[in-house]
Amino acid sequence: MAASSRTASGWGLLSFTDISMELSLEEWQLLDSAQRHLYREVTLENYSNLLSVGYHGTKPDLVFKLEHGEEPWVINTKMSTQNCPVFSFRSQLIVHQEIHTGGKPYGCNECGKAYSWKSQLILHQRSHTGVKPYECSECGKAFSLKSPFVVHQRTHTGMKPHKCNECGKAFRSKSYLLVHIRMHTGEKPYQCTDCGKAFNMKTQLIVHQGAHTGNNPYQCSDCGKAFGRKEQLTAHLRAHAGEKPYGCSECGKAFSSKSYLVIHRRTHTGERPYECNLCERAFCGKSQLIIHQRTHSTEKPYECSVCEKAYPRKASLQIHQKTHSGEKPFKCSECGKAFTQKSSLSEHQRVHTGEKPWKCSQCGKSFCWNSGLRIHKKTHREIQVLKSKTFSQELML
């Protein structure tokens, strides 16, 4: 790393090289994915802080590379006999040496997790303090790190700078693109240590491992249902008591948990912050995204004890089990016909009300059920095919 200029009488002006560290290819390859991510976060945040105190220099190549998702290593001409760069300050050398020794001298007082760099520790401590200095001016959502904040802003601008060379699909984040590429390569780097099943996303592995561990320490004394977090149990207990203290100001619907209300409000605002890395389909709640991701992994953790048929959602299993028990709790008040699902009852009641919400965009005809509309649309396609055949025959004549 080149030494920065100083005045004879003091430290002089602070430059970007004073607060950054350039890595050679060899050093970059020694870092794991988490360390590389932290390196990007620390470097970009240091540069942002430098701008905030009046720095007006040209944007460094290192920052440009990191902002565009490129690998930040440099070819360093000042190499020692051990292929390591020469540093301007002893503190930079000490931090660099941690790469070789694996030392992590900076420990978190809250949880004991240790880091090689002081700046890494500062970023980690935000997970305990809840500090989120990066707030979106569009929707108010806040972030503890700058890079997820930048990626989030693209949900408002529609910007997708990372494009797949195979199929042309574009993504907001490079990490989303890397996960998507695994669909083409078939790579599944996340493997379950219990059964050996592999996944292309870490979130899929975490969901899958829950089936093995059953790690739900907070149990309801009324029904025995267990939860992974205490606040989930608290909200569940309100469901037993019928308590719903969180009301929606838009429609008046009430909920037992504030988090449920937050998710519900998104149905009014249209916000869908949880996006699938593979197909980019977005959801209002994280649990909906987790359930959706099982469609990519073909994971079906909920199995019927009677016929062994499996489902990706617990609710789907519960509906299926009613076919064995013969239970039909949803009864029509008009004709007495009963159904296993509430949605089936709602569809049936349209027979009595005459409601026809499914409308054909081609001829305007309406139907009680979506299945009726789908069948109707086939007639348009068949007519179009028939017309094409008739036209071809006329040309031949």
Image (cartoon, rainbow, N blue to C red):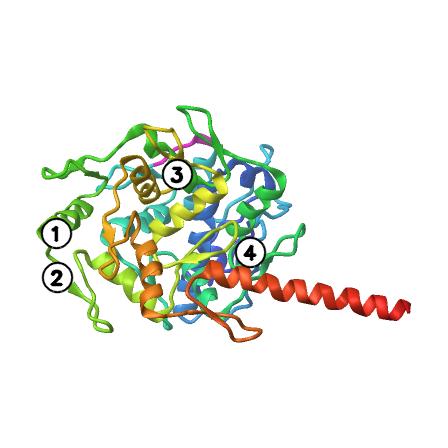
> Where residue 243 sits: x, y (%)?
10, 56
Does 27 appear above or below 21? above
Instruction: Count neighbours of disc 2 (C-alpha within 10 A) and say few if under 14, some if 14 to 19, many if 20 or more.
Output: few
Q: Nearer the viewer, mark 2 or mark 4?
A: 2
Q: Secondary structure at mark 3?
A: strand
Q: Are circles 1 and 2 on residues that touch, CB within 8 Å?
A: yes
Q: Is residue 94 visible?
A: no
Identify the residue at horizontal 23%, vertical 48% (top origin): 329
**Would residue 102 be counted in the magenta stretch?**
yes
Residue carrying label 3 = 311
- Using the numbered discs, state the Cα–Cα distance from disc 3 to disc 2 in whole angstroms: 33 Å
- Using the numbered discs, state the Cα–Cα distance from disc 1 to disc 4 in whole angstroms: 52 Å
Instruction: Count neighbours of disc 4 (C-alpha within 10 A) and say few if under 14, some if 14 to 19, many if 20 or more.
Output: many
> Where residue 393 sits: x, y (%)?
84, 66
Q: Are circles 4 and 3 on residues that touch, CB within 8 Å?
A: no
Q: Amino acid at mark 3?
A: Tyr
Identify the residue at horizontal 36%, vertical 70% (top origin): 354
Q: Amino acid at mark 2?
A: Pro
Locate residue 117 relative to residue 3 in the image: left or right.
left
On residue 62, the disc is 4
Q: Nearer the viewer, mark 1 or mark 4?
A: 1
> Which numbered disc, 4 or 3, marks the residue that appears first in the sequence?
4
> Which numbered disc, 3 or 2, marks the residue that appears first in the sequence?
2
Determine which quarter of the picture holds residue 308.
top left
Q: Secondary structure at mark 1?
A: helix
Q: Are circles 2 and 4 on residues that touch, CB within 8 Å?
A: no
Magenta span covers which residues?
100-104
Residue carrying label 2 = 245
Residue carrying label 1 = 238
